[in-house]
Amino acid sequence: MENNLFNKIKLLKQIRPEAGFALSSRRIILDTTKKSHYQILFKKQLQQTFILSAAMGMAVVLLVIVGRISSLPLEGLSPELISSLNSKDLTLEQENLNFNIQLAEAKYYKESTTQVTMALNNDLDSVAMQKQAENINSLIKELAL
Amino acid sequence: MKKIVFILMIFVLGPFVVRGQTTINIKTALQGIVDNLEQLSRRLTGNEELKIRKAALKNVIDLATAESNDLKNKLIKLEGLEGDYLKLRDTLLKELGNHSNYYDSINSVLERETNLVKIKNLSTQLKDWRRIVYHPILQRIINFILVFEGRDVLQLAEIRFNNISSDLRKVSNLEIIKDSPLNNLLVKAEGSLNKARELQSASMLIILKSSNNDTQKLIEDELDKIRETYSYFVEMSDWLKKASKK
């Protein structure tokens, strides 16, 4: 009875996985281990980089704050410190001066009144009429409305 | 949603459309007068002359109407008017309304008239009216508009000056600022701005009293002083740019 049992156990020990299955399982196991290892390494690297960048960023912010409140002479001056001297805004305002005060338009109205009043004159001869037409033509060209 | 966008577009683009249309109307009427004058300078039959003189007078009325609408829009657009200035603006708008009525009455006579002599008389009547009534009021309206345009430009320059002064105060303890030409330029800018203010005050007083032609000169001088102020601002800005590159 006992011998019989030992024989059966010996038979069970001889059981082996099919060669293909063994090979593919080994590959999967080995691959997984490898990937996990690299992932851990990458994560650690990322964390370190993040901590380093944050520290550097904080240092820059601190330097800027200290720089602004300090009364020490600066070698260079940031234009943002005096934003009201921004050259783009200034140039725009300067360019708009002529547009906002329309002296040219006032000139047009003055000339238009004279020229049109003359055109209403019934006593103009043909030469004077031609001349008047030319004057009004120049007025159209100069019209700065 | 579409309705809101449409209403917004009317508010934003409306004034430009109105102004553009006014300019086109003025140019078209002026071109019409030029064409009529060229036609009248040729040898014409009585009927041809009647037709062209009527067209010329119609063009003058159209021009006057377009100019009147342009001036009305400009007066209405002026903001922040108070007291006597508000009253004067309303008076000027009323005058322009009377002018429109006068043009309408001339136009209705012109449409019916078929007699060349009477058309010529109508032309003379309009010419005299423009000289005696329209021209002095026009001068007053133009001065009024110019003075308030000047005020707005001056206010903008004052805001710019105050902002620059305030910014400079914030950094006044920096050595680079202490040794810079910025403060000196700011003093110069203030001097020009003060002169512009004096000219503005003088022109504000004059427009209440008369249609004096000197108003225009005052505004021109004021504009020169504001230009001068900006030239100092630009000089400051240029210095700052150079300093920041060092």
Image (cartoon, coloured by chain):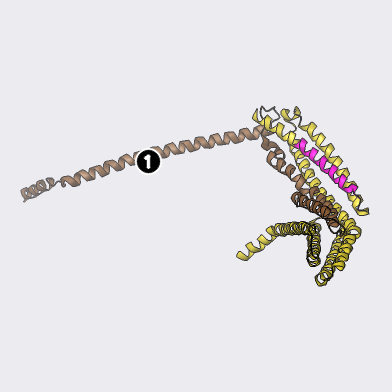
Chain colours: A brown, B yellow
Image location of residue A64, percent across then percent down: 63, 34
Query: Dominant secondary structure of the magenta stretch?
Result: helix
User: What subunit carries mark 1?
Assistant: A
> Which quadrant would the N terminus of chain B be assigned to in this image?
bottom right
Q: Quadrant of the C terminus of chain B?
A: top right
Regarding residue B132, the answer to whether it shows in the image is yes
Closest to the observer, B25 or B126: B126
Query: Quick check: is A110 in the magenta stretch?
Result: no
Looking at the picture, how far across and down is residue B225, in whole percent? 83, 40
Which residue is drawn at the image coordinates 79% and 67% (left, top)? Answer: B47
State yes or no: residue B230 in magenta: yes
**Where does label 1 land, which residue?**
A39
Give the quadrant of residue B70.
bottom right
Q: Which amino acid is tagged 1?
A: Gln
- Label 1 SS: helix
Residue B110, relative to residue A87: is it above or below? below
Q: Please state which of residues A98 and A36 is positioned toward the viewer in this rendering.
A: A98
What range of the chain is rendered magenta?
A: B211-233
Report x, y in % for residue B228: 80, 38
